[in-house]
Image (spheres, helix red, strand yellow):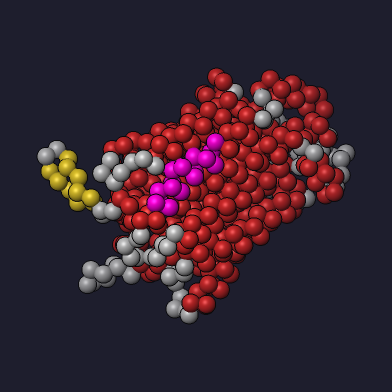
Amino acid sequence: MESNVRIGLKEKMAYGAGDFASSMFWKLFSMFLLFFYTDIFAISAATVGTMFLVTRIWDAANDPIMGIICDRTQTRWGKFRPYLLYLAIPFAIIGILTFATPDLSSTGKVVYAYVTYSLMMMVYTSVNVPYASLMAVMTSNVSERTSLASWRLIGAFSGGLFVTATANYLVEFFGSNDFGDIDYGRGYQSAIIVFGTLAAALFILTFLGTKERLEPPKEKKNSLKEDVRNLLKNGPWFILLGAAIFNNIFNTLRDGTTLYYFKYFIEGQTLAFFGKEYQFSHGELASAYLSIWVGTNIIGVVLAKPLAYRIGKKKAFFYAILIASLLSIIFYFLEPNQLIAIFGLNVLIGISAGVVMPLLWAMYADIADYSEWKNGRRSTGLIFSSSSMSQKFGWTIGGALTGWILSYLGFEANVEQTESAVWGIRLMISILAGVAGIIAAIFVGLYTLDESRMKSIQHDLRKMRK
């Protein structure tokens, strides 16, 4: 039965907890995994780049498959919530194995990385697609969906902030021995146990604290062939898919190169505060940078709803990603001794980029309504799986480019880098990311489901559902 009810605070917080869990691992993948593979597990950057391409293309294909499975799931708990319960513990276990460092040959390490990373992406998809789809069946109230999307992104960025603020310290804490040395392999393994255990508990909390209220029209039987045909005729879906892919390339290039940027370009520095000098390692500076990045993303998420209310989701998305892209291009021209400017631009880019994400998820919910209005069929799981697929494609392209560019320009882990390798790192975190963001802005400029049109569609859907 349709529900236009307002969602309570506890349920919104429970929903946001699910993305706190997912995003802890998303940040581990996007910010730490390439660095982990090259500098800790000793796999070449080119090999990792190729692995990201191969495994993530396969994983992206799993997203619509999982969406189709969800749309055809029937349980007393609903279509989407059961997957959060059943897969919470497998998610944690496979995540821990992904960051393990077994003593293997060079070939064995590559095989191990392929297998564990592929399994991790499959279980991530199996949890995240139903989680993303859940928002569209909790309420049909457009304003409440934007609010849910904001709570989801507050959870997401809070989870990311938790990781950026604690990961390096947990690795060093668990990896330290009595002689003052650090076993980074052991440190990563122990840190991921902490993150994995917390993620499993939060997925179960989301299952317990949320409710599915909307159901598809009972007189309509689900046909996979028809669902796919309708999706391929959905113009707004294609446009948003392109915008989402390039938005994720923007984020992946910036996230994936940050640790390299500070380790090999900024390096450790001595800073003066209130007349006293303090020595900061590149790792400490990177942790501060990443934490500020995610923290300012949260500010952007909070601003998304009032901005969308004032100028509409489309315009808010367009201007936010355009500003973030232009500021990112300016980032290229900063030097290591300009830390105030580096961190200042990071704040502005972070806020602008944070505005985009809740708008993106709310727009996918609008597309699900548009599809039902146009075709008389509601394929929520299939449509929302495309959002996850777009993340994977953007992440795939960005991650593969990072590995390949590093390798092409002569990057070698844990040694002093050539000028060309350092130049490539700077280029990826700034200009290349900015170009991807501008392309995303061009796509969203073509999007047609603005607020006035959605109001008309919602009015028609209320009549249809009755």
The answer to if 225 sits in the magenta stretch is no
Q: Left or right? Give the position of 250 relative to 463.
A: left
Q: Left or right? Give the position of 35 relative to 69.
A: left
Q: Find residue 319 and report its horizontal and vertical position in percent.
A: 53, 28
Q: Quadrant of residue 114?
A: bottom right
Q: Residue at x 64, y 57 (%)?
A: 57
Please indicate, yes or no, whether residue 27 appears anywhere in the rendered image.
no
Q: Nearer the viewer, residue 431 or 364?
A: 431
Q: Residue at x 14, y 38 (%)?
A: 274
Q: Find residue 224 and report its horizontal and vertical position in percent.
A: 83, 49
Q: Residue at x 52, y 77 (%)?
A: 107
Which quarter of the rendered picture does the C terminus lie within?
Answer: top right
The answer to if 425 sits in the magenta stretch is yes
The residue stretch that appears in magenta: 423-438
Q: Is residue 450 above or below residue 264?
A: above
Of helix, strand and loop, which mostly describes the magenta segment? Answer: helix
Q: Nearer the viewer, residue 151 or 262?
A: 262
Q: Nearer the viewer, residue 404 or 2?
A: 404
Residue at the farthest left position: 275
Please indicate, yes or no, whether residue 387 appears anywhere in the rendered image.
yes
Q: Quadrant of residue 272?
A: top left
Q: Residue at x 73, y 46 (%)?
A: 382
Which quarter of the rendered picture does the N terminus lie within?
Answer: top right
Q: Is residue 319 above or below residue 426?
A: above
